[in-house]
Amino acid sequence: MMRRLLAATALVAASPLAMAADALTGNVQKQPLNVAAIGMFVAFVLFTLGITYWASKRNRSASDYYAAGGRITGFQNGLAIAGDYMSAASFLGISALVYASGYDGLIYSIGFLVGWPIILFLIAERLRNLGKYTFADVASYRLKQKEIRTLSACGSLVVVAFYLIAQMVGAGKLIQLLFGLDYTVAVVLVGILMCLYVLFGGMLATTWVQIIKAVLLLSGASFMALMVMKSVNFDFNQLFAEAIKVHPKGEAIMSPGGLVKDPISAFSLGLALMFGTAGLPHILMRFFTVSDAKEARKSVLYATGFIGYFDILTFIIGFGAILLVSTNPAFKDAAGALLGGNNMAAIHLANAVGGSVFLGFISAVAFATILAVVAGLTLAGASAVSHDLYASVIKKGKANEKDEIRVSKMTTVALGVVAIVLGILFEKQNIAFMVGLAFSIAASCNFPVLLLSMYWKRLTTRGAMIGGWLGLITAVVLMILGPTIWVQIMGHEKPIYPYEYPALFSMLAAFVGIWFFSITDKSAAADEERARFAAQFVRSQTGLGASGAVSH
């Protein structure tokens, strides 16, 4: 059946794959274009640019630009958060990990999901009641604005940079595969579109692009998983048994421990995925788009349901790719490697189960996924610079909204350039792995400061500053000295830091640093900061004054 389907669609469906194969082998030949795929692709880009134009007419203030005016409902925001979270790393990266390693790919899915109860019970309500545009509003609520906002902005920008790498690599590979474009050209194209969405549409356009792509992605992934299960008579035992037969690793794909090589790396990765979620600036920023704390809680509830369902789908899609993609030479190059790399396993599976039309649909949705996420990331990074650094630190809270938004737009362009450069440099990396690094930094810098600022009365500016910077610097340095960057990218023979993920050590450094340097702070300013905790606690629980600007 599979071979008949491929034969029937060979003239149309295989053409972009053949173009990619020729590009990879250096033998570029003119191929007929996949009209269905490219048509859907272009239609979606035009549709989302239309949304951006519509949103730009409704952006009249900084609140509209950064937080959609607080007019998004809990259900809409839940879908948008799920859309933010169902990124290239989730759809392409996790399915690629399952395709390559089997059961081990689940560690990413479950790790991502476990972070949501932490946000629901510890973060969401207080964040909405205390903040305005960014999580730095909360972290600096009773502490010194300049120091804490500088730390929060730097932490946010590093997280955004690593997360952007994953999305840009996924987008570049996808367009390279679909159009046969050069990878560098593909990444530049994504960077330009990303800037357009954020420059003109702000949070309102970003939110609606995320909602629409979340619905499309859940629908497409559901169909793919359904077709995979249909091919094995809806029998999971048969799915796993047949995957074991055809996978090079055999029964090892049903056992844990193959992907993460040692207990410390596994523990570090688990900590990063669990607690990093509560430190991601583009996720935290979404809680300011709803009207009150009740809607913020609803957002998390809906998002958790959508994300949990999606994680199950990616697991089925990964095993389906082992069954239907790895066994078919049409999806491989002359050397036997998957066209476009393992990150494209889900895209090839779409071709296998639905032909050229469904390939076009999933490619367009995957691209939409990436565009929506990079828009959210870019907006979070731009707001960190314009709201936290420019308006609050440089202008000391006296900047007008027009200047603040202008700085935000300038930062957006700069982030677009950075994203393009990083996307080209990290072309060969698994995109889910790169997101693991972003989560490690979020868990080491943003999460400890945010959590303790809301819950620990004795926290002081000195403790938050030293501990936060300690966590951020430790995470970045250990990553650079680790196997991925030190060996694979910089070309050294052995890593100085032997583990792939730094979260175990960097989170420990952050929490110990914050605790020690806070309890030993005997200054008068520290006493004032501790005294303000009572007022902060009342507002965090009741929301009194939450609609106004954050101030001492």
Image (cartoon, rainbow, N blue to C red):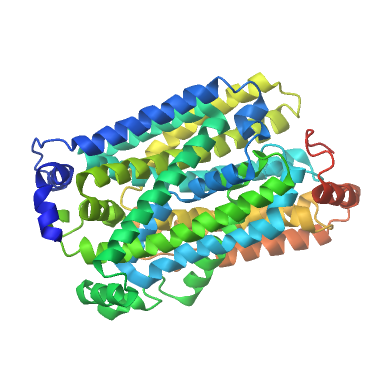
x, y percent for residue 303: 56, 52
Left/right placement of residue 398 relative to residue 157 reads right
Residue 514 location, quadrant: bottom right
- The residue at 20%/72% (across/down) is 246
Quadrant placement of the C terminus: top right
Residue toward you, 413 or 522: 413
Residue shown at the point (76%, 53%) measured from the top left: 453
Identify which residue, 468 or 104, lies in the foreground. 104
Q: How many marks?
A: 0
At a point 62% along the width and 49% down the height, the residue shown is 299
In the rendered structure, the answer to whether residue 306 lies left or right of residue 434 reads right
Inspect this view and state whether residue 174 appears. Answer: yes
- Point out residue 220 in the picture as x, y percentages from the top left corner: 36, 50
- Specify whether 55 is left or right of 9: right
Q: Can you see residue 411?
A: no
Query: Where's residue 183, x and y in %?
Result: 27, 40
Q: Nearer the viewer, residue 442 or 363?
A: 363
**Residue at x 76% of width, y 29% of height:** 396
Residue 133, given in percent of the width and then of the height, sits at 67, 37
Quadrant in which the N terminus is drawn: bottom left
Q: Quadrant of residue 311?
A: bottom left
Residue nearest the observer in this picture, 218 or 107:
218
Is residue 17 left or right of 29 when viewed as pictured? Answer: right
